[in-house]
Structure formats: C-alpha cells, structure tokens
Image (cartoon, rainbow, N blue to C red):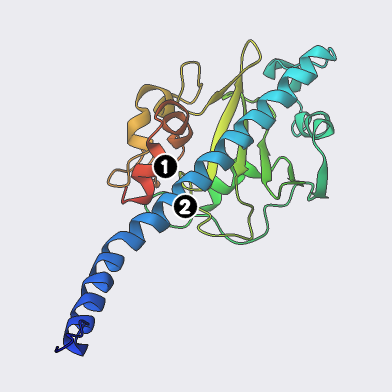
C-alpha cells in the first residue's frame, strides 16, 4: 500500500513567511508606540504626584505655599527642593541637552528663562525646573522632564510638562482654571496644538500638561501621531 507524505513546499513556506512579515511590519510600530505611550503616561503621573505631594508636605509643615510669600527672586527653590531626594542640585543652571516646542522648534531664550530659578534632579532621574520671578505675576511655575534631560525627545508635551502654583496654594497644570498667564488660560488649546502658534508667536506645548491630566488617551494619541 502506498504511503502518502504530507508537508509544505518551499514556495508555500516563503509565502507564509512573507505574510508573517507583512503582519509584523503593520503591528510592530503600534506595539512600540503603545509601549512608549504607557511609559510616558506612567512617568507623567509619577511626576505630577511627586510634586503635588511635596506641596502638600510643605503645607503640613506650615511652610508657605502661597506665591505671594515668594516675591523675592528664586526664594521658592531652596524651600521646595527640601521635599525631594536629590541626586544632583544644579542650582540655577538650565544647561544640558536643548529643549523644543511641540512643533519641533528649539525653545528660545525667553522660554528658557521660564526654567532658570532652580534646577535639580531627583532619584528617579527626573529633572525639575522652577520659575520664580521677583514679582511672580504668573504664580510659580514648575517644569518637569519626566524621563530626564539626558533622554530624548526633550520636547514640551512629550516629556517636558509645566505646572503652576497659584493663589490659594493650588497646584495645577498650566492652562488650567486659575492659571495667571492670559494666553495660556484663555485659549489653552492654542498652546497644545502642533499646527498652531501661541499668541506670542512662539511654539507650542506649554498647556499640554492640562490635557495629559484630563484626557486618558493623551499619550496614546500623541505617540500615534499628534
């Protein structure tokens, strides 16, 4: 009796491998982007929680959290940094890899001055920057590089996010209700839109922290193409 042998021809195997390759090429970028989005979301949540916790601890310890108590330039930074475990205290330096707006243009000198009143690196590698002008008309600004300055993309809205300590000691994302800078508060979408420019004519990204806190799909959308 004749025995039949069953198997795949070389051509069939090559076709199958080709199909697998096509499927992989379509799904792999989604998997990678999904992983990046999840990591960024977790880092953002950690950063926001850590800074909020520091503000709360200051209040518990009867350390003033009202911006009006820090009208002397750079007076907030020495108090604020006490509530973190520091790896490096960079004082007032913003030196490091350059930062960019959401539209990929480099931050100009005026924007870098929003980050020059205190700078330190905490144990999880995040860089924290302070803006505490002498009259602090916009409250006190805190910027966080959620994956550290040494890791790209170093871009507002991706891994650099801004928050503000406003009157009443409330700590909110830039652009939220109570934000003092008029163009961020009255039209926050214009400052988190890659296609738009802020009223000042500079790039965007300052108010993206507002949407990162309020939209659970913010990072997923961001990494799939803003």
Q: Residues within 10 Å of mark 1 (few under 14, many from 20)?
A: many
Quadrant position of the N terminus in the picture: bottom left
Q: Is residue 127 at least partly visible in the picture?
A: yes
Q: Is residue 104 at least partly visible in the picture?
A: no
Question: Splitting the image into 4 quarters, where does residue 152 fall?
Answer: bottom right
Numbered badge on residue 151: none
The correct choice, above or below, for 191 with respect to 125 in the image is: above
Q: How many tags in the picture?
A: 2
Q: Which residue is mark 1?
A: 219
Mark 2 lies on a secondary structure that is: helix
The correct choice, above or below, for 105 with respect to 172 in the image is: below
Residue 90 placement (x, y as % from top left):
78, 50
Mark 1 lies on a secondary structure that is: helix
Task: Residue lying at the far front in this picture: please name it.
Answer: 1
Residue 74 placement (x, y as % from top left):
76, 34
Q: Which residue is mark 2?
A: 36
Q: Residues within 10 Å of mark 2 (few under 14, many from 20)?
A: some
From the viewer's perspective, is 199 left or right of 127?
left
Task: Give the CA separation, mark 2 to mark 1.
Answer: 8 Å
Residue 80 placement (x, y as % from top left):
78, 30
Residue 197 placement (x, y as % from top left):
33, 43
Picture residue at 29% right of the left edge, 43% below the top: 196
Question: Splitting the image into 4 quarters, where does residue 12 fall?
Answer: bottom left
Picture residue at 21% right of the left edge, 72% below the top: 19
* Residue nearer the viewer, 150 or 12: 12
For the residues labelled 2 and 1, say whether their Cβ atoms are less than 8 Å apart. Answer: yes
Picture residue at 39% right of the left edge, 47% below the top: 203
Query: Which numbered disc, 2 or 1, marks the residue that appears first in the sequence?
Result: 2
* Residue nearer the viewer, 1 or 65: 1
The correct choice, above or below, for 215 with respect to 22 in the image is: above
């Amino acid at each position: 009796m004749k025995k039949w042998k069953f198997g795949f021809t070389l051509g069939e195997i090559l076709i199958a491998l080709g199909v697998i390759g096509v499927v992989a090429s379509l799904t792999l970028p989604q998997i990678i982007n999904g992983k990046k989005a999840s990591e960024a979301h977790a880092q953002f949540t950690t950063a926001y929680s850590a800074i909020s916790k520091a503000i709360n601890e200051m209040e518990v310890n009867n350390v003033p959290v009202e911006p009006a108590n820090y009208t002397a330039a750079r007076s907030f930074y020495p108090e604020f940094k006490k509530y973190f475990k520091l790896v490096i205290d960079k004082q007032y330096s913003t030196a490091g890899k350059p930062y960019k707006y959401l539209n990929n243009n480099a931050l100009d000198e005026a924007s870098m001055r929003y980050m020059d009143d205190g700078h330190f690196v905490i144990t999880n590698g995040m860089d924290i920057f302070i803006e505490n002008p002498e009259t602090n008309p916009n409250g006190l600004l805190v910027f966080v590089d959620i994956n550290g300055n040494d890791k790209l993309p170093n871009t507002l809205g991706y891994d650099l996010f801004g928050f503000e300590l406003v009157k009443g000691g409330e700590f909110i994302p830039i652009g939220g209700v109570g934000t003092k800078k008029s163009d961020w508060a009255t039209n926050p979408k214009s400052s988190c839109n890659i296609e738009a420019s802020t009223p000042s004519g500079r790039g965007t990204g300052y108010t993206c922290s507002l949407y990162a806190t309020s939209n659970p799909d913010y990072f997923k959308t961001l990494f799939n193409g803003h």
